Amino acid sequence: MAVRAVRGAVQLDADEREHLLASTRELVTAVLEANRLSAADLVSIMFTCTPDLTSEFPAVAARELGLGDVPLMCAVEVDVVGAMPRVVRLMALVETDLARAEVQHVYLRGATALRRDIAQ
């Protein structure tokens, strides 16, 4: 068993609370499913949002999925000129038997353009 980092991101259509929560739930669920993980495998999740997303904390969506005992943190992504707008990113630290090369990073919707090299 090793601790691995799993990356993921989703681009939102708009900064609307319910859309942010639904999109974040979709992202977290996709990361767990792609890596055959359960809540018990999660060490922690760090979420970031681009500065144009202010309607809600992404961690709220994780709590709605039942991850109440997983340490979660939210932060604002670095505001780089020309960066993709309306993106929620996550980095989950997980305990898994997967080798680093087997970890499936998940990029949804427009966020697939962020990391074409590792997006599944």
Image: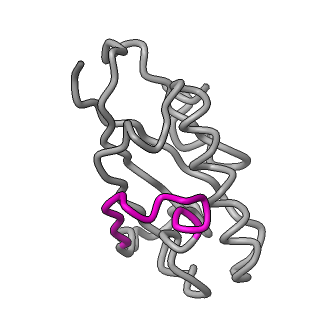
User: What residue appears at the point 31 percent right and 36 percent down from the top-left corner?
Assistant: 5
Q: Give residue 67's position: percent from left, percent from top.
A: 48, 58
**Does 46 appear above or below 73?**
above
- In the rendered image, which quarter contains the N terminus? top left
Q: Give residue 15's position: percent from left, percent from top.
A: 69, 80
- 64 part of magenta stretch: yes
**Does 113 appear above or below 22?**
above
**Does 96 appear above or below 108?**
above
Q: Observer-nearest residue: 100 or 96?
A: 96
User: What is the tally of numbered marks visible in this picture?
Assistant: 0
Q: Is residue 42 left or right of residue 36?
A: left
**Does 101 appear above or below 41?**
above
Q: Is residue 24 left or right of residue 45?
A: right
- 27 part of magenta stretch: no
- In the rendered image, which quarter contains the C terminus? top right
Which region is colored magenta?
A: 61-74
Q: Observer-nearest residue: 113 or 106?
A: 106
Q: Is residue 49 left or right of residue 80?
A: right
Q: Give residue 109's position: percent from left, percent from top.
A: 73, 47
User: What residue appears at the point 30 percent right and 42 percent down from the top-left corner?
Assistant: 93
Which of the 4 image quadrants contains residue 116? top right
Which of the 4 image quadrants contains residue 52? bottom right
Which of the 4 image quadrants contains residue 41? top left
Q: Give residue 65's position: percent from left, percent from top.
A: 60, 59
User: What residue appears at the point 42 percent right and 62 percent down from the top-left corner?
Assistant: 47
